[in-house]
Image: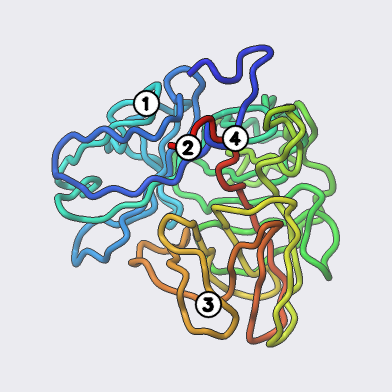
Amino acid sequence: AAAGNAGESLYVEDVFSTYLYTGNGATQTITNGIDLDGEGGMVWKKQREAVSGGFSHNVLADTERGAANAIFSDLTDPQYSLNPITSFNSDGFSVTDNNSAGLNLSGKKYASWTFRKAEKFFDVVTYTGTGVDPMSVPHNLGVTPGCVIIKRTDTTADWQVMFPGLIADGYGGTGRMRLNTTAAYAATGWTSIADSTHITIPTNLAEINASGGTYVAYLFASDAGGFGDDGSESIIKCGSFTAPSQTTFDIALGFEPQFFLVKKTSGSGDWYLIDVMRGFNSDANAGPQNKVLRTNTSGAEGAEEYYRPTATGIQGWHLASADYIYIAIRRPMKTPESGT
């Protein structure tokens, strides 16, 4: 829990975790080694199985809005007090099931991804819109964000996803996508929406800056260093690539990934959530092997065959050429201290 104090090294294990668990229909503590109580952050969780007439949405809760408040990446709904997290702990989080929401159903399988606040990795901020163009919101990421995801929490609104200064090949300006839909990238003409201390809301669009509206923003760094034994290693990268048709290609990250969020930008397509805990090992044209969940649907876990980790990035394979955007997070990196 002391990691991150002055003079101490931080590693990906200190700030990110993929944790799989089976619901027990009661209170359950998830111990993943992430200090959410002291440092703050966000938990994203999703039921992996389909539930007939039940609740299997992507659920996000964070320390800025409070553990009781849930928002859903596959819905436009405002936040609800469903108690998706009963407590943020010094080594993980606790969950319960309130029956109506099915957030910890007995015998059902769940995936969770925990993002701890840390410079050069991740930050959570909340703000109230002014309706004035532009509006500046401070953050503590310490670097210019590689990706900003914004959700209005007081009323219905689409999720807004922006990659400041980074757009897939073939596009110009700064555009946006919607985490809750399959829609392609939409050009907006916005040119500069972030720096190392602030995000600038460049419009009075209701989804991101309505007067009196309340919002949460999730900020992700990209290739910024700050981790490892000497503090020089990066653990997260936000990027873009163009997939060629029916041939393998490499996405250079500079590290081996454990988590991959990817979305087609040149056409409609799902947002894929892939991680090594559920399955991230497909060989080109070998049939679906990766286990995927989707941010834009409450559907059950599926399978795909397009990506696999390498020592320095990701090898991909696609049937047709298209442009994509992604967030990738590094595999565990601490040097072992013993043979056990």
Inspect the image, locate mark 1, and give the three-letter code of the amino acid beneath it: Phe
Farthest-out residue, front: 339
Give the Cα separation between the discs numbered 4 and 3: 31 Å
Residue 188: image location, x then y, percent: 76, 57
> What residue sits 47% from the left and 35% below the top?
42
Residue at 22 percent of width and 64 percent of height: 51
Name the residue carrying label 3. 305
Numbered mark located on residue 178 in the image = none
Pointer 2 residue: 339
Answer with left or right where residue 278 lies relative to residue 146: left
Q: Earlier in the sequence, mark 2 or mark 1?
A: 1
Of badges 4 and 3, the one in the foreground is 4
First of labels 1, 4 by sequence position: 1
Residue for point 72% across, 86% down: 245
Determine the image quadrant of residue 118. top right
Q: Which residue in the structure is indicated by mark 1?
A: 88
